[in-house]
């Protein structure tokens, strides 16, 4: 329902005229009238009669695309693309495959799309980063998403919370007549109570705002006295006539209404609407000075773009402005929501890199680029209409992830923005291109990034959990830094690294002991930091040859310890080789328990055992 309502006025009738014929006339007429359910039946009849070709398959696929039946759309796009198609068909096929979790197959179609339309921003973004999906999957979770009890068995979307009331759009009114596209009732604006426990009850229509056509969603001023809402231009008896298809083409338009007692009155259409394009999905900034909306008006980069217009104190409006290519693409961008800070914009896009269908993005309009909110906000299906009430700390979004447009409750996960600054501990100099990892309390690496030109790396982690930052750079001693539990919003870690100043004697490179865990031979993080010093020395002395001797404690049999120390020696050697040192420059020998650091016999403490589990580095040449 959402997909249709938002696209009724701009669906591209992208077919080759020569491909139409008397056999397709009935289906084409239904398609052009947006009566997709019946159009699909007619096209399927042609398939069953053996009268289908590339045109019919494409029309059938587009029909299911417009109903967001992803499985059927992908099935028929596969048939359509057996013959040459336009670039947008390959893009749509890729989106439908992605919506079904078939990312590799989707990438194959995106490569065809990029070849057909290499300058399209969607193609450019894909070619720069074709394997972006795993990163999106691994993004830090920002919100919890739960089904809202306000949803019905019909389409429900566009919920927004003002004070203790939720306004949303729904097709649940079964008493109203259906329209042909999806055979559901027309949309109405509803109001419901938002309760202290987060439940939403007592949904009723906002009668004075609704018409006999589609209405909603809406946005409300901070004082609660003004609303802007979407409605059909039929409300003003404004439409274009499609004589060929005997169809009246209305457009989505934005209307304004003011509070009149307990109802809404003084309903007026805004002056920048037109019967030639659609204007919908308004969102008013909290200061009341800017109205954001979606439109396919002239100047749009794609099918639908996000625009803004100044709301003047005298009640007039400025000239609508396109938000540009940081927000908009050649695809569709819609459902803008401007946050309480008047600068953070949430919006839905089918053109930016996402998980499938429409994904929800966030951008600071004063700086930076749009970022995908990741899972669980976004899925392989359509996710859209994200709104958030900063005072209540709660919000809503809409999605057809369960097969129908439903409303979901949004609650933020408490997060801390960790800023790591890597410097030279002796000079205070900024260290760029340092490797910085953040680990959880189970020592699992969450992410690894390189420090930027300012020596910075930023991570977002959950509140009230301890984390550890590891930083390393050639020529410096790697180190770990604790990130203590915090409720946020920010934490700064000064990761000051000591320059490597290794002691080199005539016979040995003296490092801090390379300790191993009990009964293990793998290199630990602390051990790696020390071995990095050895590697630095060997790189600075290209003729140096080293013997690495590995030792165990005296627990276990002599034979077992000999084998264990041999494995430790080999692990040490392999680590050094893996960092670029030639294999013929380092040998390894396991000494077992023959040469203890601390000769404590049978009465060794845990600390003494640990000291005996070590590696040493002798200069052979």
Image: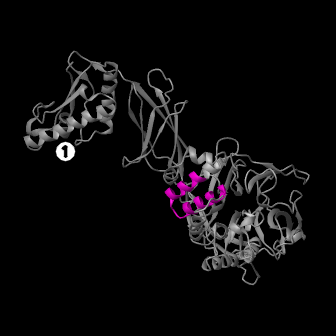
Q: How many marks?
A: 1
Q: Is residue 281 magenta?
A: no
- Residue 526 quadrant: top left
Q: Are there few (<14), some (14-19), or many (20+) residues within 10 Å of tag 1?
A: some
Give the magenta part as a residue range. Answer: 86-112
Specify whether residue 342 is in view: yes
Question: On the rendered structure, is 536 left or right of 494?
Answer: left
Considering depth in this image, is 128 or 598 the residue closer to the camera? 128
State the residue position of label 1: 519
Main SS, magenta residues: helix
The residue located at (86%, 71%) in the rendering is 234
Considering depth in this image, is 115 or 377 the residue closer to the camera? 115
Q: Is residue 480 above or below residue 399?
A: above
Q: Is residue 87 magenta?
A: yes
Task: Point out residue 258 in the picture as x, y percentages from the top left corner.
Answer: 86, 64
Quarter of the rendering occupied by the N terminus: bottom right
Quarter of the rendering occupied by the C terminus: top left
- Residue 57 quadrant: bottom right
Task: Point out residue 30 in the picture as x, y percentages from the top left corner.
Answer: 74, 75
């Amino acid at each position: 329902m959402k997909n249709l309502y938002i696209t009724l006025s701009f669906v591209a009738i992208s077919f080759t005229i020569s491909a139409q014929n008397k056999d397709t006339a009935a289906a084409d007429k239904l398609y052009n009238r947006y009566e997709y359910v019946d159009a699909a039946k007619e096209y399927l009849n042609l398939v069953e009669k053996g009268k289908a070709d590339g045109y019919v398959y494409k029309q059938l696929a587009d029909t299911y695309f417009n109903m967001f039946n992803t499985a059927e759309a992908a099935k028929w796009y596969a048939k359509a693309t057996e013959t040459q198609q336009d670039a947008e068909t390959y893009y749509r096929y890729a989106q439908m495959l992605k919506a079904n979790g078939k990312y590799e197959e989707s990438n194959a179609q995106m490569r065809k799309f990029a070849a057909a339309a290499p300058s399209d921003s969607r193609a450019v973004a894909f070619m720069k980063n074709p394997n972006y999906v795993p990163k999106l999957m691994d993004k830090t979770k920002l919100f919890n998403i739960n089904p809202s009890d306000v949803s019905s068995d019909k389409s429900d979307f566009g919920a927004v919370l003002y004070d203790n009331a939720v306004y949303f759009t729904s097709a649940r009114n079964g008493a109203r007549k259906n329209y042909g596209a999806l055979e559901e009732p027309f949309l109405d604006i509803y109001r419901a109570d938002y309760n202290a426990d987060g439940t939403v009850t007592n949904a009723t229509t906002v009668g004075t705002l609704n018409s006999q056509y589609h209405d909603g969603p809406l946005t409300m001023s901070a004082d609660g006295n003004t609303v802007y809402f979407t409605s059909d231009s039929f409300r003003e008896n404004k439409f274009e006539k499609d004589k060929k298809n005997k169809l009246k083409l209305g457009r989505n338009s934005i209307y304004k209404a003011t509070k009149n007692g307990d109802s809404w009155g003084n309903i007026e259409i805004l002056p920048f609407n037109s019967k030639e394009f659609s204007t919908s999905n308004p969102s008013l900034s909290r200061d009341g000075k800017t109205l954001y909306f979606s439109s396919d008006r002239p100047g749009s980069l794609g099918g639908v773009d996000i625009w803004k217009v100044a709301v003047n104190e005298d009640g007039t409006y400025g000239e609508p402005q396109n938000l540009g290519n940081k927000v908009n693409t050649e695809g569709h961008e819609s459902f803008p929501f401007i946050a309480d800070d008047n600068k953070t914009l949430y919006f839905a896009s089918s053109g930016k890199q996402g998980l499938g269908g429409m994904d929800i993005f966030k951008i600071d309009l004063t700086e930076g680029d749009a970022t995908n909110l990741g899972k669980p906000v976004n899925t392989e299906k359509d996710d859209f209409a994200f709104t958030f009430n900063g005072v209540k700390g709660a919000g809503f979004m809409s999605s057809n992830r369960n097969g129908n447009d439903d409303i979901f409750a949004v609650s933020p996960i408490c997060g801390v923005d960790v800023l790591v600054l890597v410097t030279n501990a002796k000079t205070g100099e900024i260290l760029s291109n340092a490797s910085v990892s953040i680990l959880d309390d189970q020592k699992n690496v969450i992410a690894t990034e390189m420090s930027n030109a300012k020596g910075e790396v930023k991570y977002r982690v959950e509140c009230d959990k301890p984390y550890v930052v590891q930083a390393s750079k050639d020529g410096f001693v790697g180190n770990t830094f604790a990130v203590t539990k915090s409720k946020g919003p920010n934490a700064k870690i000064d990761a000051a690294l000591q320059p490597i100043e290794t002691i080199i004697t005539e016979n040995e490179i003296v490092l801090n002991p390379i300790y191993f865990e009990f009964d293990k031979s793998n290199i630990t993080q602390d051990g790696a930091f020390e071995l990095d010093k050895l590697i630095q020395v060997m790189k600075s002395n290209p003729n140096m040859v080293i013997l690495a001797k590995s030792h165990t404690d005296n627990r276990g049999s002599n034979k077992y310890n000999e084998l264990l120390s041999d494995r430790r020696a080999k692990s040490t050697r392999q680590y050094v080789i893996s960092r670029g040192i030639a294999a013929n420059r380092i040998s390894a020998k396991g000494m077992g328990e023959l040469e203890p650091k601390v000769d404590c016999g049978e009465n060794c403490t845990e600390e003494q055992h640990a000291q005996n589990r070590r590696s040493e580095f002798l200069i052979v040449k």
